[in-house]
Amino acid sequence: MNLEALELSTQVLIAEARGRGVEIELLDADDNFIALRRGGRTEYVKQATRTSADTYISALLMENKEVTKKVLRAAGLRVPAGEKFRELAAAEAAFPAYRGKKIVVKPNSTNFGEGVAILDAAADEAAYRAALAAAFALDASVLVEEFVEGREFRFLVIGGMTRAVLHRIPANVRGDGRATIRELVEVKNRHPYRGEGYRKPLERIRLEEVELAFLAGQGLGPGSVPADGATVFLRKNSNISTGGDSLDLTDTMPPVYRCWAEQATAAVGAAICGLDMIIPDVAADGAEAPYCILELNFNPALHIHDFPAEGMNRHVERHVLDLLGFH
């Protein structure tokens, strides 16, 4: 079995399963589809976290961001204010309501940060229309939401408990006073943790249309030379799938936020969930501490918690196998 052809999350799950005496059959390498067998039992797993432990309806709930918000709001949890649009013309006509506000424009049913745009309060109508066009190109309905200030964290909840927490930082480089941004990206991409197609813990940083436009907004370009020690961000969104960094904060995350993540996961009946939460100040850990749950993700990646850019390996694949009864 050529494990290197599989996504890293599936690789780590297979390695742990073998250590537990579980027989593995590779059903479809392109789809990362495997069968796990032991003691007369068979469990089918796709992409490491699509399993029989989750019902079809829980997956559909997490897939639809607008429905997710309604379910979480009904459960007494905090979600961003916003509006759903099914027609581009109606969304464009709503610009006056959002003028002067920092907002997020995103497809209703996509993952990995695809089609997500964060617009500053100073953004003009042309930028708003461009963001809508990009989002509608990926989905039949689009959300326009308030931008919630704070740090973004990914909670991985498996079997009703928070197993790992990451703080994700947008794709960035740190200047040395000599190298250009393009050269700094090339150096950072040489790290053995960076690759493509989710076969490495971190994705390579790109310098394409989105990154170049974001740099231009800062008065920079790929040939600019950042000052020594200066951090230059290449994107607004913090997804690891677009070159972001990951910092493991599992041991320092206060219990109140873990509890809210677990309540949100339970509200949609999910067994495995990747929850994105904004927290303005993690030091505020009382019952009234501010937070906002951005979305719930079905089929969350495991490898980002095993191989963070900073922090320890959480071996989260162990909890998936435990959930499936392969102790």
Image (cartoon, rainbow, N blue to C red):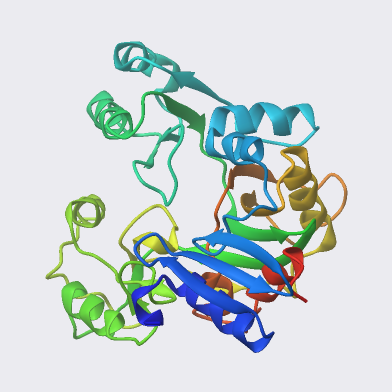
Residue that lies at the very extreme toward the left in this rendered image: 223
Name the foreground residue: 268 vs 192: 268
Quadrant in the picture for residue 283? bottom right
Q: Residue at x 39, y 68 (%)?
A: 198
**Which residue is nearer to you in this view: 53 or 78?**
53
Q: How many marks?
A: 0
Q: Is residue 157 above or below residue 325?
A: above
Q: Nearer the viewer, residue 237 or 231?
A: 237
Residue reaching furthest front?
A: 40
Left/right of residue 72 with respect to residue 87 in the rendered view? right
Percent of width and height locating residue 264: 74, 43
Counting from the top left corner in percent of width and height, residue 141 is at: 41, 24
In the image: residue 204, left or right of residue 248: left
Residue 171 can be seen, yes or no: yes
Seen at 36% across and 11% down, the residue is 90
Indicate the quadrant containing the C terminus: top left, top right, bottom left or bottom right: bottom right
Q: In which quadrant is the N terminus drawn?
A: bottom left
Image position, residue 124 (x, y; %): 28, 28
Which residue is at the far right? 287
**Can residue 283 be seen in the rendering of this structure?**
no
Q: Where in the figure is residue 49, as x and y percent of width and height?
A: 58, 60
Q: Residue at x 35, y 34 (%)?
A: 122
Residue at figure coordinates x 51%, y 38% from the top left? 147
305 over 62 or under it: above or below: below
